């Protein structure tokens, strides 16, 4: 509800992309506060508390990059952040689990690359699709987090997914909506940090289900040729087709979890 009101207000005020770019990371921080019922102290103690500051620092860097007009620096930070996040989250495990931390960093890098890909679309379409992709991925990660012994990450994922759905609904035809550096470094970066925490710290993540879910980030590379072939030009139709494509790997991931855990799946 807060995300819907904020997104609607910014659209009514015709705020520029710099302001609308803050909707996603702000929603993540509020979702974190609701899920964990606190704002962690600094310096953070424990991986869960580090998630908040990964998102805060990422948001601040994103705002500075956009204000300075340094697009190249922004792209470099977007790809570097998951690597730094994995090292930061998994600091305690670096001596004895370097390969696991490296795998988490590589996974985060691939996720960011898929999210930041927006070639071939107008800025408003690209922004809406990126936000949609992140929201669907969060919803798909929720059951994996729950089985990874992290009910708080489960709540965080669902809260953030709901907020993104509200943001997209309010901005589906808004040319001033922006999903740029702040959204990537703050919103997506925080989400990746949460997933890395569940994977590296609880160590109960269903890796097969996570691998299947990761295929959702291949969607941007697949859907465009299909849309060009069917000559779909309406933005709503394009987004609906994109959502349908994204839901395929998400559904397969959830089915994998249920099939592997059966009656022990926590409902």
Image (cartoon, grey):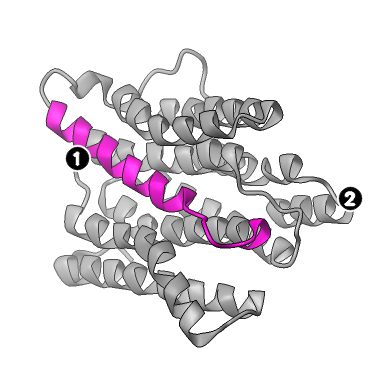
Which sits in the foreground, 50 or 108? 108
Comparing 94 with 64, the one in front is: 64
Q: Mark 1 points at which residue?
A: 203
Nearer the observer, 157 or 225: 225
Most extreme residue toward the top, as rendered? 43
Compared across the picture, whether 148 is left or right of 163 comes to left
Q: Are marks 1 and 2 in contact (CB under 8 Å)?
A: no
Rendering quarter of residue 5: bottom right
Q: Where is residue 3 in the image (x, y as percent from the top left)?
A: 69, 52
Task: Point out the tag, 1 or 2, that comes first from the N-terminus.
Answer: 2
The span from disc 1 to disc 2 (Cα, nearest Å) is 46 Å
Specify the quadrant that holds the N terminus. bottom right
Residue 126 in percent (x, y) is at: 58, 58
**Mark 1, other Cα within 10 Å: few <14 / some 14–19 / many ≥20:** few
In the image, residue 194 sits, relative to residue 61, either above or below, namely below
Tell me if residue 76 comes above or below residue 209 in the rendering: above
Q: Is residue 71 depicted above or below 222 in this figure?
A: above
Magenta span dominant secondary structure: helix
| Residue sitting farthest toward the left | 96
| Any part of residue 147 in sight | yes
Residue ID for mark 2: 13
Measured as percent of width and height from the top left, residue 170 is found at: 73, 63
Q: Report helix, strand or loop for mark 1.
A: loop
Instruction: Check residue 105 for magenta coloring.
Output: yes
User: What secondary structure is marked by label 2?
Assistant: loop
Give the image location of residue 201, x and y in percent: 25, 33
């Amino acid at each position: 509800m807060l995300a819907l009101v904020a997104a609607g207000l910014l659209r009514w005020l015709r705020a520029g992309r710099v302001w609308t770019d803050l909707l996603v990371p702000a929603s993540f921080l509020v979702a974190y506060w609701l899920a964990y019922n606190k704002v962690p102290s600094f310096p953070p103690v424990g991986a869960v508390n580090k998630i908040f500051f990964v998102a805060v620092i990422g948001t601040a860097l994103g705002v500075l990059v956009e204000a300075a007009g340094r697009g190249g620096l922004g792209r470099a930070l977007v790809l570097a952040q998951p690597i730094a996040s994995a090292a930061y989250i998994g600091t305690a495990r670096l001596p004895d689990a370097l390969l696991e931390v490296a795998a988490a960093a590589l996974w985060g890098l691939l996720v960011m690359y898929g999210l930041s890909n927006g070639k071939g679309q107008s800025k408003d379409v690209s922004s809406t699709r990126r936000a949609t992709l992140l929201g669907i991925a969060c919803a798909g990660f929720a059951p994996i987090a729950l089985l990874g012994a992290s009910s708080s990450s489960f709540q965080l994922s669902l809260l953030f997914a709901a907020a993104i759905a509200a943001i997209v609904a309010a901005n589906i035809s808004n040319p001033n909506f922006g999903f740029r550096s702040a959204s990537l470094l703050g919103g997506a970066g925080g989400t990746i940090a949460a997933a890395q925490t569940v994977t590296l710290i609880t160590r109960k993540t269903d890796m097969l289900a996570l691998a299947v879910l990761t295929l959702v980030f291949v969607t941007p590379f697949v859907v465009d040729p299909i849309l060009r072939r069917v000559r779909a030009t309406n933005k709503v139709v394009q987004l609906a087709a994109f959502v349908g494509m994204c839901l395929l790997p998400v559904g397969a991931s959830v089915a994998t979890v249920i099939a592997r855990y059966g009656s022990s799946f926590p409902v």
